[in-house]
Amino acid sequence: MRNTASRVRLAAAAVTAVASIAALAGCSSSSHSGGSSAASACAPAKGKVTLQYWNTVPGMDKVVALWNKQNPDIQVQTKDISNDQYGTISNSLKAGNAPDLAQVGYDELPNLRTQNAFVDASKCGTATADKSKFVPWTWSQTSFGGTGVFALPQDTGPMALYVRTDLFTKYHLPVPTTWDEYAADAQKLHAADKNISMTFFDPNNAEWFNGLLWQNSAKMYSYSDNKWQVSVDSAKSKQVADYWQKLIDAKEVRTDLANGSTQMYAAYQKDQIASYVGAAWGYSMFRDNLPKQAGKWSIVPMPTWSTNASSGDWGGSTVAFMKGSTHLYESVKFNTWLNTDPQALALENKLGGLYPAATAGLKMPSLSQGVPYYNNEKIFDVFAESSKNIDTDFSWGPTQKTVNLSLQDAMAKAAAGKGTLSGALSTAQAKALSSMKDLAIPAESGK
Amino acid sequence: MTDTETRARRVVAAPDAPRRRRSGGGPRAGTIAAFLTPFFLPFVLFYLVPVGYALWQSFRVVRRTGGQYGTSYTTFGGFHQYAQVLHNTEFWSSIGRIGLFGIVQVPVMLFVALIMALLLDTPLLKVKAFFRISAFMPYAVPGVIAAIMWSYLYSPQLSPVVDLLGHLGLHPDFLGPGAVLWSTANVSTWLWTGYNMLIMFSALQAIPQETYEAAKLDGANNWTIAWRIKVPIIAPSIVLTTVFSIIGTLQLYAEPAVLRQISSNISSTFTPNMLAYAVASGNNYQQAAAISVVIAVITFVLSFGFMRLTSKKAGL
């Protein structure tokens, strides 16, 4: 969901339309799968090795070319799977020809884990030693709370508030530090001019909404008593839902725009919206799509629910160790380089817009400079601070994609006036339980 | 088709046919095989095998060894997946939605196609080639591209149509909860009317001129000729296009899937095929397979039911 423009989304839809037929007609052999294979032992191979690495990051081929030049014995081949990332990965797993390494979003990790998609690289000493190199919450996601090393974190999407300073000045709005202040600003702005909204609530974007829930320390999933404890509709989550419901009901935020769509840029272009609740990777979206608004934007920390600093994450990915890899030792070596080497991280940030998950990456020279578009503000300091304030205990569910779709459908109904966002969380809670039951994953309603 | 076959058989079996052609069974079988293989091989590989695989999948269920993540495997589950589908309210509401869509869209589209075909067939219309090409043009546009194009015309932020209507004091919401189904129907209609028109038009072309001359001698005007002679004669092609449209409606996917990108009023389970895709993307391949099979059965029943219902009247 690191989308840039609606054209990309529409093109993706086009491919999805085709892929869906392929998925329904051609999904390969049964999902019967054994435990870890014997080939996963961590020993260096004799002679030259070629690794397969599937990803969706623009410019990744150039990063890999750099590695290939420096490591003649471990050659890496990349494949761009951005057309249908998880469809491609799932189908390859069933067909038994998965790559050595694949890019997987944090929220899809548990899902693929329940499909036995990964190999545990913790038997490779260096993999476990990598722990100290990454932002803590990213490590707990990829090690599933310390039960192994199944992927290395690549990038993250720490959230912040994008503010149109010129509009804030014009309407005498104070920059908000809490959600209450943000709502007060929204009301003031709406009262001053009905045609301007504080922001938009994208009902078709569960990933974004999940980031807001995450910020409020909502726990959607945990595991105890030999069962998954599902609490998608917890009080913490409902607090967030009720807050946005009020803004929607008062028509103080718009609900007719999708993140990254041409329509969204058009609304910002016409000065109809004064702020944006976004992630680190979004900084280039405004820079590239609204060049005339250079100097009008500022990035500040996300408003908080209490006086404690807290933030959420929206998006970001890992590079997973896929089941069936015969070269785990070399995979660990390459994966570690790819996600911790300063040269690699700088290139990925420049070409692919990745905001690194490695702590050293956050201190990259390119990330400590002012950004011209944002009045030469050091915006990455804001994201680095945000990254530190993300709740490390948050975990995703094993049927997250199904739950997200269900949440989106119900959120859209709420935005259309049929139901509430709080009700949408209850719908998603029920869907979480039933979808897990369908896949024989033991689950119950959490406390 | 049956007619042509029997006629062909009669020709082959005719007493005056050369005898050696009848006795030469060997080479003839080889020839038949040579002609049929290019069709049957892909047909088996890309149609029968996937259908069989989907059927097999639909009778399986996922099981799992213990633990937080466990190890999954599939096993025979009888009609479990089908029971799930039949009890799925989302499935039935998607069928209901598509039913409403079809009941309105199919007659409208075919009526427009018929009128256009009849117009094309009259001497009244002068610029036939231009009319035919422009009516058929939308069919040449892939469905996904058409949906993208229309999504720009529907979108309030970008659409010149919405802008223009705004100047006239109208503020339509093409993507609103009540309107979005009909906006989707409009894309389908735009795409397929020309195609259906061509099928009906080619049927009209096959009517011998003598029929019209006879009608004119009997005092029929253009109107009577159109409704009393042309339409009844091309009834089989109208039935055919209706069957195609029923099948197409039940398989609706690309247009709503694209419009979903700009309208949150299209849910992920808007049409039966979208539901199947959503379930498959949640890794529940077995239930997705069962949904697909049920859609196929409903399509089969409806299209063949319609054929049976109309075959006598249409003279098929």
Image (tube, coloured by chain):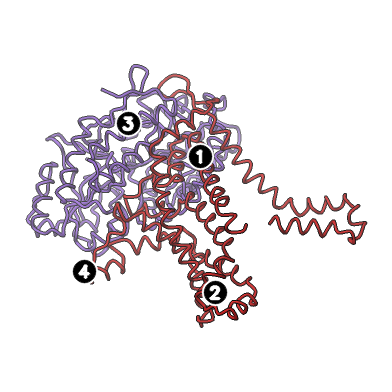
- Mark drawn on residue B225: 2
Label 1 CA crowd tier, 10 Å (few <14, some 14–19, many 20+): some
* Marks 3/1: CA–CA distance: 24 Å
Q: Which residue is mark 3?
A: A430
- Which secondary structure, mark 3? helix
* Marks 4/3: CA–CA distance: 44 Å
- Labels 4 and 1 share a subunit: yes
Q: Across the whole image, how many numbered discs are drawn on residues?
A: 4
- Labels 1 and 2 share a subunit: yes
- Which secondary structure, mark 2? helix
Task: Give the camera-side residue of A356 and A156.
Answer: A156
Q: Which residue is mark 4?
A: B169
Colour applied to chain B:
red
Question: Percent from the top left, x then y, of residue A215?
Answer: 22, 36
Give the chain of mark 4: B
- Which secondary structure, mark 4? loop
- Say what amino acid the circle numbered 2 marks: Ile
Labels 3 and 2 touching (C-beta < 8 A): no
